[in-house]
Amino acid sequence: MSDGRARYLKYFVVLIPTAIVLIGGWQFRWVAEDAYIDFRVVHNILSGYGPVFNHGERVEVYTDPLWVFILAVSSGLFRFVSVEWCSVLFGLFFTGIGFWFAGLGTYNFAARRTSKRVYPVGLLCASCVAGVWMFATSGLETGLIFGWIGVSWWLLVRTFLKAQRGLIMSAIVISLGFTIRPDMALLTICFGFVLFVIETRGTRAEGAHLRRWQLLLALTGIPIVSELFRIAYFGMFVSNTALAKSASRIWLHQGLEYFTNFAGTYWLWIPFAVFVGVTLHRSRVWWRLDYHLDVLVLLAPVVGGLLDVIYVTAIGGDFMHARMLLPGFFSVFMIFWFEGSPSMRNAPLVAAVSVWAVLSVLLFRFSPVGNLSSNGIANERAVFVGGSEVAHPITPRDFAKDGWEIAGVAVRRVAPSLSSRIKLINWTRSATYSLVAQEPRSYRITTSLPETYYVGFPNIGLFGLAAGDNTYVFDELSLANPIGSHFAVYVRSRPGHEKIVAPVWLDARFGSVATPRPVGVSELAFEEAQRALSCQPLAGYLKSITAPLTFSQVFSNFVHAFTWTTMSYSSSPYLAEQELCR
């Protein structure tokens, strides 16, 4: 085959899966309620309040700092485009970039050892999965993850094929995984390790020692700076969200349910079995021919992806169908390819994958009764399409009929203006949206925080953005709550919804002895919670995240970060007082 025809073939076979995933992603465009948490942070950044959810309280409520940064920059530059639409367009853009460069990387890598035509069928299969379409947009960071994985794989192959060309730039891009989502560190480590091996086996002897130090700095510089900023600003080693979701605790039974929910829905065992057999055979042949480095490069995304799948499965997965397993799935599938035209030997494999791809595009969908399965896993997109009664819910206007948006708008309407010196607290329970909207029961409080209206609520995305700058949202699911995120979990329940904060904690933190107690909260429980909040290390932590960020406060954050990160206590005021004070 001539070079011109080979080039056209390469771009054509890569264009097909890229086009499929972009079309599918656009057809499934939407924004998840959780994405609105990031949007409120973006709004606060652009308003000069910093990367926080509530003004004057430094709590890291996101796990995707690079995605938040991209949304903040794009929203600041393109004021005529809402942050919601920025998230959709950038998510789709990065998804397309990821599939395109993943395909080019696989094609270039495969062409090194064969003169036959190369077909990246693994990438084609990944593009046919409806779960990928759902989160190509969604307002969350998944599209950015696809883009980062695809570009990192392409850069790794390019560095390998062109004798270390662009080694340092490849390392910098690969290191960004730490700032996209914590579990991407597994892929970063695998890619970075192979980069080191490529450099070690390079032919350049002069300056090799200095070059390796430069490579190490390129791989670790951004992650180290990012972590130092987190400790200095937030006083924690990990994000508050990671604590709220118990991201370090093993919950294998639920994780296997989550894995089965994803793999079983799309019958992924069919293409996976085919691809594993082909890849193992190919790797064995290469190893016998002493193409050891080729095998190592090939396995970098596979090992990284499988480690990510194992980690997500081990900690119990997520409540959103497919979402947390998509990076590992994409990493593993993108490196599979077939060579040449179908023959008698591989025709059955090609036929099996082709039939599966057609069925996946047309039929395979996750549609539990009521959009929520018995194990707590939800078709999140279907939930909000149904709640909003809009086919593609993206902006707050699209969610106008959703109860959380209605409640947020109602709170914003009754919240006092910033010029008011009266601070109010609302004891209305979160589930009764009508009471929030029609009968707010508010009482005066005293606090140094700048908001004037304080209200407890779960599912703080839509509600939090709609409630506005004057409202402090006391997150009852702990994602943005510096108290609830440290609760100990004794009985596992729905993933991401286990650390429930009762009204007594809102009362104890912002109320006073003269303030009437919420319904169901006794004076004794109030006093116990107040005493717990006054004991160390919790009292010191709450003071640190609300105090001015002076040099001495930054130093204190570094000194106490480990203690504040690892502290844990009961959600019961009585037990919390015992654990913290006695």
Image: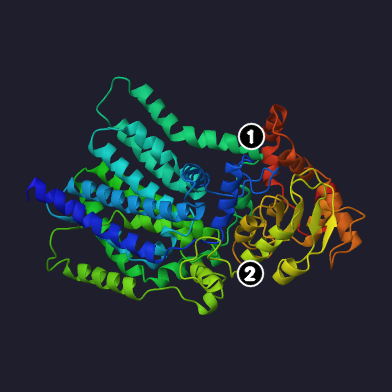
Tell me if I can see residue 196 in this picture: no
The amino acid on which the numbered mark 1 sits, given as a three-letter code, is: Ala
Is 352 placed left or right of 218 in the picture? left
Q: Position of residue 361 (x, y in %)?
A: 32, 71
Q: How is the image coloured?
A: rainbow
Numbered-mark total: 2
Q: Residue at x 49, y 44 (%)?
A: 66
Taking 282 as reference, is 500 left or right?
A: right
- At label 2, counting other C-alpha atoms closer than 10 Å, the crowd grade (few under 14, some 14-19, many 20 or more) is some
Q: Is residue 531 left or right of residue 80?
A: right
The x and y percentages for residue 321 are 49, 66
Q: Amino acid at mark 2?
A: Gly
Return the mark for residue 403.
2
Pointer 1 residue: 232
The local secondary structure at tag 1 comes to: helix
In this image, 344 relative to 265: left or right?
A: left
* Residue at (61, 52) in percent of width and height: 241
| Disc number lying in front (2 or 1) | 2
Mark nearer the N terminus (2 vs 1): 1
